[in-house]
Image (spheres, rainbow, N blue to C red):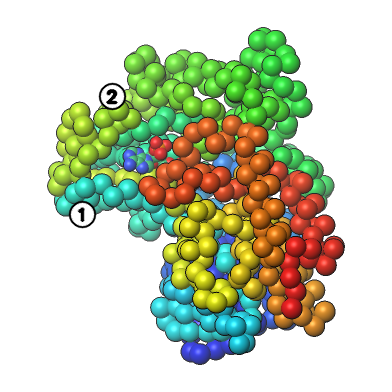
Amino acid sequence: MAQKAQSPRDFDAVVVGAGFAGLYMLHRLRGLGLSVRVFEAGSGIGGTWFWNRYPGARCDIESLEYSYQFSPELQQDWEWSERYATQPEILRYLEHVADRFDLRRDIELETRVRSAHFDEVTGGWAVETDRGSVSARFCIMATGCLSSTNTPAFPGIDRFAGPTYHTGRWPHEGVDFSGKRVGVIGTGSSAIQSIPLIAEQAAHLFVFQRTPNYSIPAHNAPLDPAQVRRVKADYAGFRAQNSQRPFGASFPVNEHSALQVDAAERAREYEARWQQGGLGFFTSFNDLILDRAANDTAAEFVRAKIHSIVRDPAVAETLSPRQVIGCKRLCVDTNYYATFNRPNVTLVDVSDAPIEEILPTGLRTARATYELDCLVFATGFDAMTGALLSIDIRGKAGQTLLDKWAEGPRTYLGLGTAGFPNLFLITGPGSPSVLSNMVPSIEQHVDWIADCIAYLRAQGRERIEATPAAEDAWVAHVNEVAGMTLYPSCNSWYLGANVPGKPRVFMPYLGFPPYVEKCNEVAAKGYEGFALG
Ligand code: N01
């Protein structure tokens, strides 16, 4: 059990969140001899992997890579069972990490941070939770990129008579859909993973699709012991190689343009990647997110696959996306498109006939009414900024983060934001985060922050803050890079476009290996772009 709070208390650092980021941050700071308190709103550790328990939830980065590398013993000892780990297996892994490194004694569960205010007098942070207040020199946000759920404000939503579920807040005891008429709203990654399994149980499943998504088969399987032996024989080498790849993951990158090769060669490459399965499809060629004509060739290949899998040509057409492939996060599935061949599954296109109202017994679109016993919101997250802005964060002169970010998030390297001294963000907006393998990106941020705090101590400094000039230049650079890609061409959560009223700004930074070099260079130059005090 976590220890209970006694307020007020003073710590060297407060960490908000006990997922992959918060757990490792605690471990590193403890290693520096700092007193640390971690606050976690959930009743257990695990963050994303605590909350997202919907049927079929699993990671689409391979398990041998979606894991910590800070402990060679841990990575040798832990045995993943499948190519892509399920949510329960990842949660078991994080529970093991918490026990193995004795982390639980500094974690307070079921404790939500309400506010964090910078105190000009002490130069530290006053942090208020729903169970009391603490103070700390450093405040570190390990709140996750996809943790604040988004449920559209459909009229009548509170009058629905049956149970409703959000994929990102799934009941721990599971849900039995047997004999039920189920409605799933949304067709992003969470929907694409859960729909095939819900369809196997439900009497009838209605899928309400506003925008079709591209999905690549996972070809999940038990891990091959020979592959595990090979990786474990040189785990450090495997990690080092991945760290040099565009997304920090092992999928091979083809260094050619899709337009440099002929149609037959393109088809061979796409087919090989399709058979291999997973997100590596997107590195079939090096210009898929840069050049519309190149992108069209990949998009067309997937559309043809959809038509070859789905028997009803009209349904296949409705499932076929028209936007740039990869513009919205690419999905990875097991039997997604084939599920629409089942007689108990109906695809409802709500792109031109939106959901107008939730009724006590179902929902009504602009075209028809559907009778439903339960409703699943697979409607995603207020990504990257939602969890941060749900906390009343105030920096110098009482400036709120909400005000500062009113026109979109502004950070330096995604690690800090001007006007908020001693506040660190782990995988904040402006860092590669969701455009990279999250676990290595988290470790890189945690190591950078821990090294920074150690440096401040060694230099007798108490304060660090991004300078407005460094921040302005970084924000301009992040936007410039995004502007060179096809990412801004569709409505995605990367742009905040899924949440009504959210400023349309491309939030992650594309450029994983160069980003790490930049962070290292900043540190080597005595934290260039930060003011130390
Ligand atoms: O959420 P999403 P998600 N009416 O935002 C629809 C990660 N993840 O939870 O596209 C009707 O992608 C919305 O439609 P549209 C991964 O990074 C990873 O699925 O806005 N529909 C969309 O179809 C992923 O990208 C894994 O037109 C509405 C859906 O809801 C991210 O989490 C697994 C609507 C939301 O899709 C988020 O995925 C799961 C409305 N008013 C998640 N509002 C793996 O590792 C929204 N929608 C495998």
Q: Position of residue 323 (x, y in %)?
A: 49, 27
Q: Determine whether 442 is above or below 437 in the image.
A: below
**Disc 2 secondary structure class:** loop
Residue name at image x 62 percent, y 30 percent: 289
Name the side, left or right, on which 29 lies relative to 279.
right
Query: How would you rate the neighbour count of disc 1 (Cα within 10 Å): few for under 14, some for 14-19, many for 20 or more?
Result: few
The answer to whether residue 25 is above or below residue 187 is below
User: Which residue is pictured at 46% across the width and 20% down the height?
Assistant: 306
Q: In the image shown, does 214 or 103 lie closer to the viewer?
A: 214
Q: Which mark is residue 158?
A: 1
Quadrant of image for the C terminus: bottom right
> In the image, residue 254 lies at what x, y percent?
74, 27
Q: Vertical placement of 495 versus 394: above or below?
A: above
Q: Which mark is residue 293?
A: none
Determine if residue 23 is in view.
no
**Is the distance from the Cβ of mark 2 to the nearest ligand 1 atom less than 8 Å?**
no
Residue located beneath label 2 in the image: 343
Q: Is residue 509 visible to us here? A: yes
Q: Quadrant of residue 278?
A: top right
* Rendered location of residue 209, percent (x, y): 35, 33
| Left or right, residue 200 beside residue 326 | left
Q: CA distance from mark 2 to mark 1?
A: 30 Å
Check disc 1 and give the amino acid type: Asp
Earlier along the polypeptide chain: callout 2 or callout 1? 1
Is 390 in front, or is 254?
390
Q: As rendered, which of 385 and 372 lies closer to the eye?
A: 385
